[in-house]
């Protein structure tokens, strides 16, 4: 029920891309700055490397939310750079091949995790690997509620529990309190924004492009636009008609490349 709903409406997203050949603004990080070689891209089905992303803006587009303020809603990042942002939602599928791919390609992406879905199977340890796989300082784990409800149907207090509860769990598990929140199915109301602000979220992140199995669908027009946020899910062959998550990501990266874009880290912009 959950996944079917997510497939139709899109309920999460992710973004990824390889590390530039030289350390860019991540000089303070301890992660390896070495770029993936062309062989790594070929191994994962790409005939050429993804372009290194341009330097991100000196200041993020969103500020810390002060008490009483509500977080900004971000559907698409305002930029003229030919970059898009990969986001992966929920956390059901834990494909080891995707973890190897993310590490080999140093893909930047954002994970929006729902507690009772991400926790299933081998649990949060898988997402720890994916955090470390990204370019320095690593990929971020962000908030997608405790149980993936339609928040519009919940009281203010129940919404607060869903959002703050997952903030607390992720902070305890990963040592960093999430700063972004994605409401399941993209459904929210004023109570959601108030709760998210109270829970320490600085932006509510939606999306403009949705990854299917072989290619993307676009909210507007027939292709990507600068700053698009791409929604994808942690899904496996049973939801992808036999395609693995790693293959789905290869399809997505090929399409992004073909359209002249590369991938960057959402948290550097938002
Ligand atoms: Zn979702």
Image (spheres, rainbow, N blue to C red):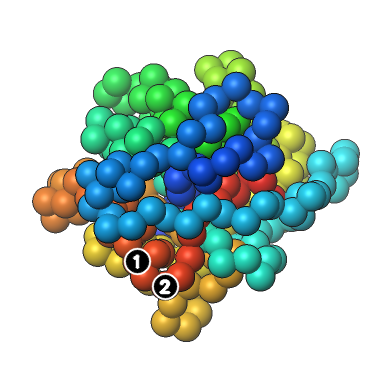
Q: Are marks 1 and 2 in contact (CB under 8 Å)?
A: yes
Q: Residue at x 42, y 82 (%)?
A: 222
Q: Position of residue 247 (x, y in %)?
A: 22, 50
For disc 2, the marked residue is: 259
Above/below status of 87 relative to 121:
below
Q: Residue at x 30, y 32 (%)?
A: 100
Q: Nearer the viewer, residue 4 or 229?
A: 229
For disc 1, the marked residue is: 255
Q: Nearer the viewer, residue 206 or 83?
A: 83
Q: Is residue 11 left or right of residue 241?
A: right
Whether the residue carrying mark 2 lies under 8 Å from ligand 1 is answered with no
Q: Is residue 10 left or right of residue 206?
A: left
Q: Residues within 10 Å of mark 2 (few under 14, many from 20)?
A: few
- In this view, the residue farthest toward the left is 242
Q: Is residue 198 left or right of residue 253?
A: right
Q: Residues within 10 Å of mark 1 (few under 14, many from 20)?
A: some
The label on residue 28 is: none
Q: Residue at x 29, y 20 (%)?
A: 122
Q: Position of residue 214 (x, y in %)?
A: 24, 64
Q: Position of residue 81 (x, y in %)?
A: 62, 66
Above/below status of 195 relative to 133:
below
Q: Position of residue 265 (x, y in %)?
A: 57, 47
Mark 1–mark 2 Cα distance, whole angstroms, equals 6 Å
């Amino acid at each position: 029920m959950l996944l079917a709903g997510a497939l139709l409406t899109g309920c999460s997203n992710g973004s990824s891309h390889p590390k530039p050949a030289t350390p860019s603004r991540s000089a303070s990080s301890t992660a390896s700055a070495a770029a993936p070689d062309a062989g790594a891209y070929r191994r994962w089905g790409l005939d050429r490397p993804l372009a290194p992303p341009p330097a991100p803006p000196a200041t993020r587009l969103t500020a810390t939310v002060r008490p009483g303020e509500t977080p900004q809603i971000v559907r698409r990042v305002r930029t003229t750079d030919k970059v898009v942002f990969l986001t992966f939602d929920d956390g059901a599928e834990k494909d080891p091949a995707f973890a190897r791919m993310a590490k080999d390609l140093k893909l930047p992406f954002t994970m929006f995790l729902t507690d009772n879905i991400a926790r299933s199977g081998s649990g949060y340890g898988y997402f720890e690997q994916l955090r470390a796989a990204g370019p320095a300082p690593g990929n971020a784990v962000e908030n997608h509620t405790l149980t993936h409800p339609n928040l519009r149907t919940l009281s203010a207090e129940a919404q607060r529990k869903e959002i703050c509860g997952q903030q607390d769990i992720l902070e305890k598990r990963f040592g960093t309190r999430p700063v972004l929140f994605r409401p399941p199915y993209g459904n929210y109301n004023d109570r959601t924004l108030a709760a998210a602000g109270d829970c320490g979220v600085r932006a509510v992140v939606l999306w403009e492009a949705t990854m299917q199995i072989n290619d993307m669908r676009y909210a507007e027009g027939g292709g990507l636009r600068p700053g698009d946020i791409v929604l994808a899910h942690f899904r496996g062959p049973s939801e992808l008609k036999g395609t693995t998550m790693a293959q789905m990501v290869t399809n997505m990266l090929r399409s992004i490349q073909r359209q002249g874009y590369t991938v960057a880290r959402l948290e550097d912009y938002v």
